Image (tube, helix red, strand yellow):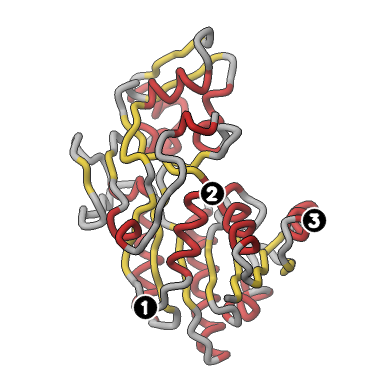
Amino acid sequence: MRLFVTGASGLVGSAVLRAGVAAGHQVTGLARSDQAAEQVRGDGAQVCRGDLRQPEVWAAEAVAADAVIHAAATFGPDMGDVDRAAMEALVMAARDTGQRPRLIYTGGIWLYGDTGGQIRDETAPFDPATPWGWMLDAVAMLEASDATDLAVLHPGAVYDSTAGGMLERFHAPEVEILGDPAIRWPLVHADDLAQAYLLLAGLPGQGGHFLATAEPGRPVGEIARVVAGPDAQIRVLDRAEALARHGDSAFGPMLDQRLAARRVTALGWRPAYRDFTQCL
C-alpha cells in the first residue's frame, strides 16, 4: 500500500510512518523543515517537502497515494482554518487528477464532550459546544464532496513510552491538574494508535467515526502521580482558575470521559498497551 502521512515528524505521524514502513508499505511523509525531512528519511520513508499551510504544493502527491493519513495540525489559533484549507486542497486535487484516495482524518475524543460517568462509544452524540467544532465542519465538507474514501479516527489522550504526548505535562517539578483529580482520560499509546490508522487505511469503504482508546478512562490524579513520582508537588486548579490561566486549552483536559473503541476493535484492532504503566 502507498501511504502519504501528514505530520510525519510529530508524535502520532511518526508512529504511523514507522509502523507503515515496518509493515512493508511504501510510505511518504510530509516534512516542512530539514530536521523533519532527516527524521522521515531516518525512519525509512520517502520525503515530500511541504508545509501544511501551503497544501497546493503537496496535495497532488498526497492524493496519488492509496491512502492519506492526516495527522498534522498547527496547534495555533488558526488551526481550524489551516486544516480546512488543507482538506479543501485535497478535495480539489482528487477531482483534478481523477483519484479517490482513502483518507483517514484525525478528529479527537474531546469532540464527544463529558460522558457523565458512563462508558460511551461511537454512537454517542458529539458536543458542538467544544472549541474543536471546526473538525466536524471539515468532516461534513469531506463527506459532501465524496472526493475521498473517508474515515474519521478519534484518538484518546496519546502518550508514548517516554511518557510524552499528553503525559508530558506531568514531568514538571510542580505539576498542575486542571479541574479535578477524579476526571478520567481515555488513553492510547502512540504505537497502538498507529496500528489503528493502518488498519483503517487498508479497509476501503469502512467509513464513519472510529474511537481509538485502549483504556476507556483513567483518573488524571492517578496518571499524574505515576508519571510525576511520589515526591512531586501536585497542585489542583479549579475550573475557573484553569480557564483563566490556560484559556481554551484547559477545556479538553477537564472533560470527564469514558470512551470505548468498539468499532475499530470489531475490525481487529488489538492494542498492546491496555495499562499505561506497562511502558513507564
Residue 235: x, y in percent? 44, 13
Answer with the quarter of the image where residue 276 lies.
top left
Q: Residues within 10 Å of mark 2 (few under 14, many from 20)?
A: many
Q: Is residue 222 above or below residue 79?
A: above
Residue 205 image label: 1
Contact (Cβ within 8 Å) of mark 3 with mark 2: no
Return the residue nearer the eye: 6 or 18. 18
Quarter of the picture containing the N terminus is bottom right
Residue matched to label 3: 38
- Point out the tag, 3 or 2, that comes first from the N-terminus: 3
Residue 191 tag number: 2
239 to 209, vertically: above or below: above
Between circles 1 and 3, the one closer to the viewer is 1
The kind of secondary structure element at disc 3 is helix
Residue shown at 49% from the left, 57% from the top: 195
**Spot occupied by residue 22 in the image (x, y as percentages of width and height):** 63, 60
Asked if 16 appears above or below 97 in the picture, the reply is above
Q: Is residue 209 above or below residue 115?
A: below
Q: What residue is drawn where x is 72% and y is 56%?
A: 43
